[in-house]
Each structure stands twice: as structure tokens, then as C-alpha cells.
Amino acid sequence: MSSKFNQPLGGNQMPRFGGMATMMRLPSQPNAAGLDACFVGVPMDIGTSNRSGTRHGPRQIRAESCMLRPYNMATGASPFDDLQVADIGDVAINTFDLKKSVGIISDHYDGILLHDCVPLTLGGDHTLTYPILQAMKKKHGPVALVHVDAHADINDEMFGEKIAHGTPFRRAVEEGLLICDKVYQIGLRGTGYSSDDFDWSRNQGFNVIQAEECWYKSLSPLMERVRKNIGDAPVYISFDIDSLDPAFAPGTGTVEIGGLTIWQGLEIIRGGAGLNIVGCDLVEVSPPYDPSGNTALVGANLLYEMLCVLPGVSRN
Ligand code: MN
Ligand code: MN
């Protein structure tokens, strides 16, 4: 079947283990011109506080995406029939300077948004969400946020530094990048420094759903509430792979037990259908701790699921 839109290279055209290692074996191009959505990598780990390696995340997610086929058998979405999508490569961060890298990322996303293109970001450590949200504000104003993570990432500083992978959402609030009562932090858990570690979030008006509130449950009812509250506000989805239990996603830097299941992660993303999604990221995949490639595989699939719920994608 011929289409006016880019299609992933099929398994009968080139063996799945061959060809260029772009996301989903899509065509690549150097910028977002003419695209409705793009996959873009931010190969960065200089904001991490424990195990490093997420600089290799984008490349490994692309490699593990080679099995992905275009049609979503569960939801009926067929994103490549509705949207023009390509892989636009990686952001050339300065791996010796985190603060400069934040500026580089923000500028790069300004350029993507200039083309009215929705970026789907392959991380990279979670620091990268902060400069992306800066660019989002310039384009859309403050955004609603679905933040799936084991951690709240709302530290004021880490080791005396304001920029790190544990601080992006504190900086985002300070700069007015978020519609605070339309922020959902889902999957938070683990050990803390004190009992009020998540209260800063709650005090900003964030909706905090700790992992224990998710255990043994479908998260579809939660997402119904999320959709109702967010309404037609622009919304950004930031998915930290460590939100999932390490049984499913061990290849990450700051691991917490007792996390979400794969199917809960799918329910969260699929439950975003109908929202005015303006950008998404999948962060914290660390290939050196992912010898089977399974964590990157999960990340690749979740990014595809994000593509499937973007505005303009129909379900048949
Ligand atoms: Mn995080
Ligand atoms: Mn995390």
C-alpha cells in the first residue's frame, strides 16, 4: 500500500536486524521541516546522580525498536497513516558541561517547535525535560504534565547544584512552565530523606499518586480522571523508565523496587488518547545496565505508544 507519509521499513524489505538504526526504521532527516511528529535523541548522562550510561540510551532504544511494526493491534492506531514522522537524530549536547547542555537542548527544541512538530524524545537522563519544558512554554504557554517516575525530581539542589536529573520539575515550577494543578506524578516510591519528601509537590498543587496506590489495580480509571481535569490544555508526557518495577526495566541508574507493571505503563499512555499532547519523552534507559536490551525494548515500545495517542491519530 502506498502512502503519502513516511513508513517504517518493513521486515520484508530489509531484515529487521539490518539497515540504518533509526527509530522504528523510519527515514531520517536533519530537522523537523514538514513533520507532524519526530523522534529525537538526547544522548546525555551528565545529570545523573548514581549509575551513569543513559548517554547510550537513544542509540539502544533505536536498535531495540527494529521489531516494531506500524499498526497497534490493541488500540487500532495506525500513526503512520495519519502523521508525517521521521527520526531527526540527536541533539549535540556538550558532554563536558551540563548547564551549557541545558541551553543547547532548549534552543534545539525551539527549532523543532518552529515547524509545529511534536517531539518524542529518546533519553538521556531526566535533566533534559527541564529545557524541553522551557521551549514548550515559549510555544504553548505553561503545560499540563503527566510525569511517570519512581522519583518526584523536585529537589531544590543536588550536591549544591540547581541543574541535575533530580531537579527538573522544581526548576519548571519556578519558571512558570507548568499548570501546577494539572500535573500528575504517578509511581513515586522508595526510601526518602524524610516523611515530607513528596509534600513540596503536593504544596504546588500537583496530583501525587504513589506507587502503592497503583498496586494490583488498573490505572485506566485514574487516566479517566486525568483526562477530565486536564481537558484541552496542552499536555506534556514525561516517562522515566524507573517508574516501572526493576523486574521489567532493570537497565536504569536509580532503581527502586515495588514499581509499576508494563501493562500499567501502557494504560497510562493509552489513557492519554484524546489529550492535547504537545510533547513526550522516555528517559533514563541505561544500556550498560541492560545486557538483555529489555529495558530499551520497553522504552522503544512506550515511545511508539506515545506516538499512537498524539492528536490526529485515528483509531480504526
Ligand atoms: Mn526522573
Ligand atoms: Mn526516576
Image (cartoon, rainbow, N blue to C red):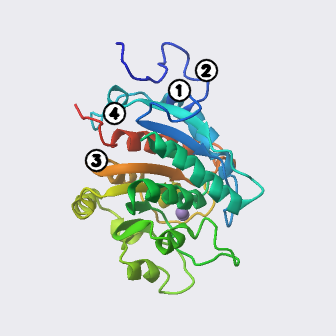
Mark 1 and mark 3: span between their CA atoms?
Answer: 24 Å
Give residue 270's position: percent from left, percent from top.
32, 47
Amino acid carrying label 1: it is Arg
Name the secondary structure under disc 2: loop
Precedes in sequence: disc 2 or disc 4: 2
Mark 2 and mark 4: span between their CA atoms?
Answer: 23 Å
Task: Give the residue at x 64% y 73%.
Answer: 162
Disc 2 marks which residue? 19
**Marks 2 & 3, CB-CB < 8 Å contact:** no
Give residue 140's position: percent from left, percent from top.
39, 55
Question: Which sits in the foreground, 46 or 262?
Answer: 46
Task: Give the residue at x 53% y 87%.
Answer: 194
Mark 2 and mark 3: span between their CA atoms?
Answer: 32 Å
Amino acid carrying label 2: it is Gly
From this view, report whether residue 220 is shown above or below residue 20: below
Name the secondary structure under disc 4: loop
As drawn, the label of residue 72 is: 4
Precedes in sequence: disc 2 or disc 3: 2
From this view, report whether residue 310 is shown above or below residue 201: above
Disc 3 marks which residue? 273
**Marks 1 & 2, CB-CB < 8 Å contact:** yes
Amino acid carrying label 4: it is Asn
Question: Which sits in the foreground, 131 or 251?
Answer: 131
Name the secondary structure under disc 1: helix
**Marks 3 & 4, CB-CB < 8 Å contact:** no
Disc 1 marks which residue? 25
Which quarter shows the N terminus? Answer: top left
